[in-house]
Image (cartoon, grey):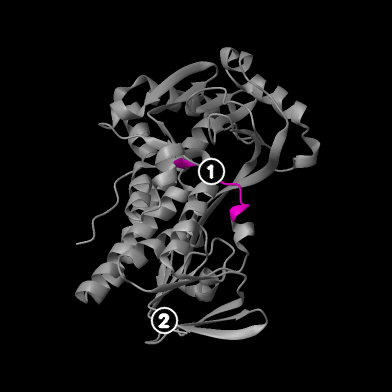
Amino acid sequence: MKTQVAIIGAGPSGLLLGQLLQRAGIDNVILERQSPDYVLGRIRAGVLEQGTVDLLREAGAHARMDAEGLPHDGFELVLDGHRERIDLKDLTGGKSVMVYGQTEVTRDLMEARQASGALSIYEAGDVQLHEVQGEKPYVTFTKDGEAARLDCDYIAGCDGFHGVSRQTIPADRLKTYERVYPFGWLGLLSDTPPVNHELIYASSERGFSLSSMRSATRSRYYLQVGLEEKVEDWSDARFWDELKRRLPADAAARLVTGPSLEKSIAPLRSFVVEPLQYGKLFLVGDAGHIVPPTGAKGLNLAASDVDALYRILVKVYGEGRVELLQRYSEVALRRIWKAERFSWWMTSMLHKFPDNDAFTQKMLDTELAYFLDSLAGRTCIAENYVGLPFETIE
């Protein structure tokens, strides 16, 4: 089997890259070790930056997003009960975000790929990458017990933090930057109307909370919890009671509670490896970087990686500009580090760190208050939240 670009991983980044390449006439095959149902069962975030929305439209996977997604022109930040709305549209010259679940994005991209006739191989076992520094890289795998080989020009590693792509690169060729945070997010999904028409990021003495949504009838809430906490110790009643304590009084009074559809605890970490390329292998999305979810950057950062690699490959195949391949890592990393900074800043400002002394906590509270009291500060928050521009590939 032969293709131009082998894509490892059928999450949203792999599917989006595959769809864009296919529409540009660049042949590609996606290999995924899990089943389609497993991929769709992953519960993930759902705030899409303007650039991600535009890229999904360019990929032709936007019809349901445009019909069912919830455009948000702002969000609220709460510091000890004081509410401040960040007016995204006003502060960024008309930009906004779209609330649309990552599961739905994945479903739309799967359907678009199926309609295109491009090949996706699910439940591919023992995926291994070979000769990634040579002239003729290839991928081996098993399917239904049979060994198979996929020859290609380039490999896009879109298979996440635990995938084989990054592990293929010798450890001494990568520099790792990482921070593990001393808490996690306990998330609850429920078929209840959201407590607010826009997201509420709240910092309180009891810890951080986030009030989000997937639709007008489905809500997603999060609580900061210690790493020692276990999901089974959190009944629905305990979760709702704690959320009410962390919300402003008026929001807590109108909170509609109900049975959980899903509960889980996710640890928070910041993680980046450099470089994001090794020979003809290119790391995309979580394979090369992780952000804490506070800044709503995970999926969006993967989309910016996709944008950079896609536009480079279009010029490689269309204009023969193979020298551009060496720019992928530096282009992607410029935007990655800015998103890492914003996610780290939001996490630091809004959470309670167990080891912070009283002075450090006062400095953090004052830092956030300063940004909220300043037009320049609110503008900085807004332009990062809607997403910094994708870099043009010349």
Identify the residue at image location x=63%, y=13%. 253
Residue at 52% of width from left, 63% of height from top? 10
Callout 1 crowding tier (Cα within 10 Å): few <14, some 14–19, many ≥20: many
Position of residue 315 relative to residue 102, above or below, is below
Q: Is residue 279 at least partly visible in the picture?
A: no
Q: Which residue is at 71% across, 35% downward?
A: 260
Residue at image mark 2: 152
The picture places residue 308, in percent across and down from the top left corner, at 32, 60
Kind of element beneath mark 1:
loop
- Residue 5 shown in magenta: no
Crowd rating for badge 2 (residues with CA inside 10 Å; few <14, some 14–19, many 20+): many
Residue kind at label 2, given as amino acid type: Cys
Distance CA(mark 2)–CA(mark 1): 32 Å
Write the residue at 36% across / 38% down.
386
Query: What residue is disc 1 on?
Result: 45
Task: Work out which residue is located at the far right of the displayed protein and give it.
Answer: 233
Q: Which residues are magenta?
A: 40-47
Q: Secondary structure at mark 2?
A: loop
